[in-house]
Amino acid sequence: MEKSDILAATHAGTKQIEIARKFNCCVDTIRSVQREFGFARWRELTPEVERECVALLRLGHGQYRVAKMTRVPQKKIHELMLKYYIVHPVGGLPLPAPTRARITERVRERDAYGIRIAEKENVSKEPVLRIAHQIYGPGRFRGGRVPPFTFVINPDGNIEANCRKFVDDVFRGTFSTEAQAMELTRIFTKLVERYAQLWYDGNIPADRNAFIEELVSAYLPPNLRGRTPFTPEEWRKQRQFVADHVRTAVDSLAGTESVWKN
């Protein structure tokens, strides 16, 4: 009885994944039942089927549409177009006004992803995506009532800021506070070491406070202040943060100059 229901759903055009969900089984089981009863997703391209496909193509129907109507793979439909020198104008036949209106409404309501809207309206996905891009711009169209990343009201449209936030969240969520502190110490130690090698022949100057202030100013130059979104208080905290790490690095390197300066 279940096999009969599976075959009935198959003949009705229901997808294998949807049939599997209905019968609470895997897709492979559905495929095995279909094979058992000699049902194939695609028809064999006999001379009669070939003439049917060619006739539809010459009427102006697109490859996707003909593949759906005849149950012949779209790749073979394309090969038939080449074989019989059938050329369609760019863009194909225009959508009927009612179909275009329904697609536009579905896109505005974010009824589903572009390919699902195309299946519901029995058209290819290209005209659906063209309509979506005309409405929302060139970004990826995302259904399910979720604005795409490039949509103007979506804060995720700020890709650069989002990327920094993602990296920061991953770093903080992956490494402990101690690991983060050790990594920052290593970075600033390398910075101090390199700066001393470039400008002081690998030596830490006697006036460490002046050296630290010089290095902090090189790291955060005063003319950078006006080009950042920091408030004066935030800028002061940033400089203090850098200064503390530079001071720690200087103190750790001051006693090992003979080792690292060469």
Image: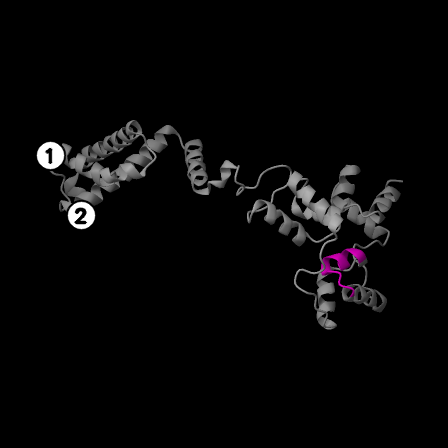
Amino acid type, mark 1: Asp
Rendered image: mark on residue 198: 2
* Residue 135, horizontal then vertical, whole percent: 60, 45
Disc 2 marks which amino acid? Leu
Badge 2 element: helix
Q: Is residue 65 magenta?
A: yes
Q: Quadrant of residue 21?
A: top right
The image quadrant that residue 8 belongs to is top right
Q: Please tell me which residue lies in front, 36 or 110.
A: 110
Identified at 81% across, 55% down, the residue is 40
Is residue 262 something that shows in the picture? no
First of labels 1, 2 by sequence position: 2
Q: Is residue 150 above or below residue 239?
A: below
Question: Badges 1 and 2: C-beta atoms under 8 Å apart?
Answer: no
Relative image position of residue 186 (x, y in whole percent):
29, 38
Dominant secondary structure, magenta: helix
Residue with the mark numbered 1: 207
- Residue 78, position in %: x, y? 71, 65
Crowd rating for badge 2 (residues with CA inside 10 Å; few <14, some 14–19, many 20+): few
